Amino acid sequence: MEHHDLLDEARAAASAAYAPYSGFGVGAAVLTNDGRTFTGTNVENAAFASTLCAEAVAIASAVAAGCRQIERIAVAAADGGPCPPCGNCRQIMNEFGVHHIVLEDATGEAEAHALEAMLPEAFGPEAVRRGQAQ
Ligand code: THU
């Protein structure tokens, strides 16, 4: 699957966003290592802190279907502008092995960014396993 195809799925997902408070709709689409795709949208809440980001919803859908290895994730804002993932979502991506994040560049084209560049020196599962070894 090409980067722009995954970004198109994220754009399509954004149209279902539930964002009555911010008005900022987001869509995400993941491609798993076994070739399946799952999408998500942001789901806001009157208790603002209970809001779910689109990336977290898409990744949770993949995990709920048994896919724990995610190759790529595309993120798109409903307004067509750029939508770099928030820090919490970068951390969630790290847990499930995401290699690349596909975003729109300044001209609207799909551009892949390495997660390692967007979340350097990440805290991951290996660190917690050190504690289990003791
Ligand atoms: N949002 C996402 O869905 N993903 C991000 O990575 C950044 C922010 C959503 C959360 C909220 O509904 C709206 O965008 C404004 O913050």
Image (cartoon, rainbow, N blue to C red):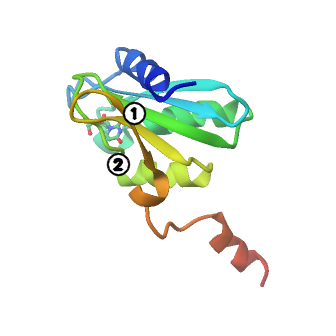
Q: Is mark 2 within 8 Å of ligand 1?
A: yes
Q: With respect to residue 118, does 6 lie above or below?
A: above
Q: Quadrant of residue 67?
A: top right
Between 102 and 48, the one lying in front of the other is 102
Q: Secondary structure at mark 1?
A: strand
At which x and y percent is residue 54? 42, 33
Q: Quadrant of residue 111?
A: top left
How many residues crowd mark 2 within 10 Å: few (<14), some (14–19), many (20+)? few
Disc 2/disc 1 C-alpha distance (Å): 11 Å
Residue at (47% x, 53% y) in the render: 115
Residue at (53% x, 68% y) in the render: 123
Residue at (57% x, 47% y) in the render: 98
Q: Quadrant of ligand 1?
A: top left
Q: Which mark is residue 114?
A: none
At which x and y percent is residue 130? 71, 78
Q: With respect to residue 127, does 93 lie above or below?
A: above
Q: Which quadrant holds the N terminus? A: top right
Mark 2 / mark 1, whichever is N-terminal: 1
Callout 1, which amino acid? Answer: Val
Left or right? Give the position of 108 relative to 52.
Answer: left
- Determine whether label 2 and label 1 are within 8 Å by CB: no
Q: Is mark 1 within 8 Å of ligand 1?
A: yes
Which residue, as the protein is rendered here, is positioned at the far right?
Answer: 133
Q: Quadrant of residue 127?
A: bottom right
Between 88 and 78, the one lying in front of the other is 78
Q: With respect to residue 118, does 76 lie above or below?
A: above
Q: Which residue is mark 2?
A: 86
Q: Which quadrant holds the C terminus? A: bottom right
Callout 2, which amino acid? Answer: Cys
Residue at (68% x, 28% y) in the render: 35
Q: Which residue is mark 1?
A: 75
